[in-house]
């Protein structure tokens, strides 16, 4: 894909986030790792531009130091977290940060999402952990986010929201959508009196399947 194609895909992704209730206004941010010979580059949404007004030409191209390569404006305030995710996860081709309601509520409560449905483990890699608090737009947040993310596809950012990664943009969108759905199921199940996790042996098997699908070492 050309840079223009990637920019257009990012705008479409932002519209999907807003349409599915995963983002509102300028809340959250989206990035894609760009294939480039000899240089690591990222396309990322600009800071404080509402999704409804975002055009492909406003999506910036930056390097792994956060320096601009193409485009005008200021890259997302969470650029450091996106770049940290790409450095820590060579398999990640896209990253999305959302402030979706149910997942954010659990992040504020400091409660991880345990492995409660099969799809969660197969797609996300298991429970969705909570990263220790780091102030927004800081290296501290970026470091703590990727430490908690590990080899899984999503992490709750304490008192903040969600970070999800995928091998491509479509997968990253599916990840953050699933996190919100599972968060909602978990909250509602607890309101009904009990949220029972999957059996340990099922989680272990499905985590192995996830690792195999994503090329991570499978532990015995």
Image: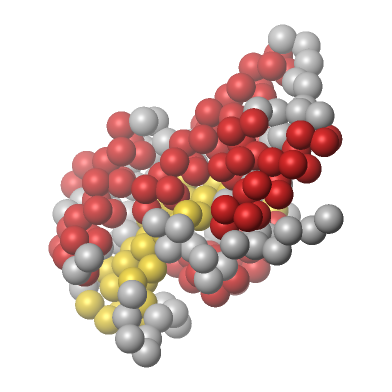
- Quadrant where the C terminus sits is bottom right
Query: Which of the 4 image quadrants contains residue 7?
Result: bottom left
Residue 176 in the image, given as x and y percentages of width and height? 49, 42
Q: Is residue 87 left or right of residue 200?
A: left
Q: How many marks?
A: 0
Residue at the image position 83 percent from the left and 35 percent from the top: 200
Q: Residue furthest top?
A: 192
Query: Which of the 4 image quadrants contains residue 104?
Result: top right
Q: Is residue 37 above or below residue 103?
A: below
Residue 165 in the image, given as x and y percentages of width and height? 50, 55
In-front residue for pair 196/139: 196
Colouring mode (rainbow / by chain / secondary structure / one colour): secondary structure
Residue 213 in the image, given as x and y percentages of width and height? 57, 53
Residue at the image position 76 percent from the left and 34 percent from the top: 202
Q: Is residue 200 left or right of residue 56?
A: right
Q: Is residue 35 above or below residue 54?
A: below
Q: Is residue 169 above or below residue 64?
A: above
Residue at the image position 61 percent from the left and 41 percent from the top: 122
Q: Is residue 164 left or right of residue 10?
A: right
Residue 169 in the image, given as x and y percentages of width and height? 37, 53
- Quadrant where the N terminus sits is bottom left
Q: Is residue 44 left or right of residue 107?
A: left
């Amino acid at each position: 894909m050309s840079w223009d194609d990637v920019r257009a895909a990012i705008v479409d992704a932002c519209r999907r986030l807003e349409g599915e209730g995963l983002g509102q206004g300028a809340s959250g941010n989206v990035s894609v790792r760009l294939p480039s010979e000899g240089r690591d580059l990222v396309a990322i949404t600009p800071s404080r531009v509402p999704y409804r007004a975002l055009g492909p030409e406003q999506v910036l191209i930056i390097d792994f130091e956060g320096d601009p390569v193409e485009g005008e404006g200021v890259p997302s305030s969470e650029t450091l977290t996106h770049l940290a995710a790409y450095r820590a996860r060579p398999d990640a081709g896209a990253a999305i940060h959302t402030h979706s309601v149910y997942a954010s509520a659990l992040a504020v409560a400091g409660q991880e999402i345990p492995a409660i449905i099969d799809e969660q483990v197969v797609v996300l890699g298991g429970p969705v952990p909570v990263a220790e608090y780091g102030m927004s737009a800081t290296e501290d947040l970026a470091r703590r986010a990727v430490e908690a993310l590990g080899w899984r596809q999503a992490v709750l950012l304490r008192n903040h929201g969600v970070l999800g990664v995928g091998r491509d943009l479509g997968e990253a969108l599916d990840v953050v959508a699933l996190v919100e759905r599972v968060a909602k199921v978990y909250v509602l199940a607890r309101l009904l009196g009990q949220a029972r996790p999957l059996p340990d042996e099922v989680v272990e098997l499905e985590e192995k399947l996830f690792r195999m699908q994503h090329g991570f070492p499978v532990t015995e």
